[in-house]
Image (spheres, rainbow, N blue to C red):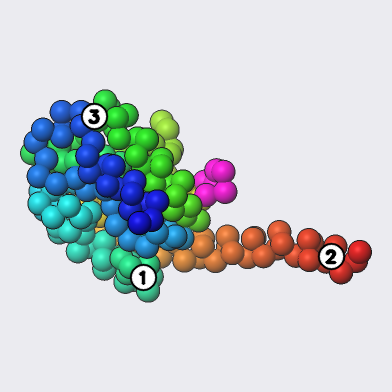
Amino acid sequence: MSALNKLNEEIALCQSCELAKYRTKVVPGEGVEDADLLFVGEAPGYHEDQQGRPFVGAAGSYLDKLLASINLNRKQVYIANVIKCRPAKNRDPLPVEIQNCRHWLEKQIKLINPKMIVTLGRYSMAMFFPSKIISKIHGTSQKKDGIVYFAMYHPAAALHQQRLRTVIEADMLKIPLLLAQMEDIAKAEQQPQQLSMFGD
């Protein structure tokens, strides 16, 4: 069993907060374990709670379309949430719930070691872009500790506000370019080392 699968089994046994009493299933996350792209949503909804999988409702269908727009699918990325259990009536996650679950996500990030983390929604954004406002920073990125963090609206926002659909789709199209730039930078950083080897 892989380290990530083992971690996800630990997450499934978590009893750290009140959400554990009411969940049907824990939703640790799913996807390829060495993904370049890690998408982080906010919290499981009804359908996710029933199936134990992230983004399987209407917002998930839209996320699949967004991935297809950059020639990707779920088997090529990893998808997780800030919190792993559904809040009652799909309410917003509470600060204490986010804090209790934070270490699970941090461990997932360490094991997956993605090149880029895409935050979906303001609660996910707040973990990596503290005190920022999503309407101002969506579609922008910052690099920290070798990982690029890219902020986006949650796919569900497009289902509730049609005007955001164009914004979300445009932001998604920026991701391949950012990944390509990262690869170019990585190659450039390796080049001097290769030259010095020949020079010795």
Q: Is residue 77 left or right of residue 83?
A: right
Q: Does the stretch in magenta take in 142? A: yes
Q: Which residue is mark 3?
A: 16
Residue at 51% in and 60% down: 178
SS class, disc 1: loop
Q: As drawn, is 197 to the left or to the right of 101?
A: right
Q: Earlier in the sequence, mark 2 or mark 1?
A: 1
Residue reaching furthest top? 96
Q: Nearer the viewer, residue 19 or 44?
A: 19
Circle 1 packing at 10 Å, graded few (<14), some (14-19), many (20+), is: some
Q: Which residue is mark 2?
A: 197
Residue 81: x percent and y percent?
A: 29, 46
Image location (x, y in percent) of residue 171:
39, 58
Part of the protein shown in magenta: 141-147
Marks 2 and 1, Cα distance to the nearest angstrom? 37 Å
* Residue type at numbered disc 2: Met
Q: How many marks?
A: 3
Asked whether residue 122 appears in the rendered view, the answer is no
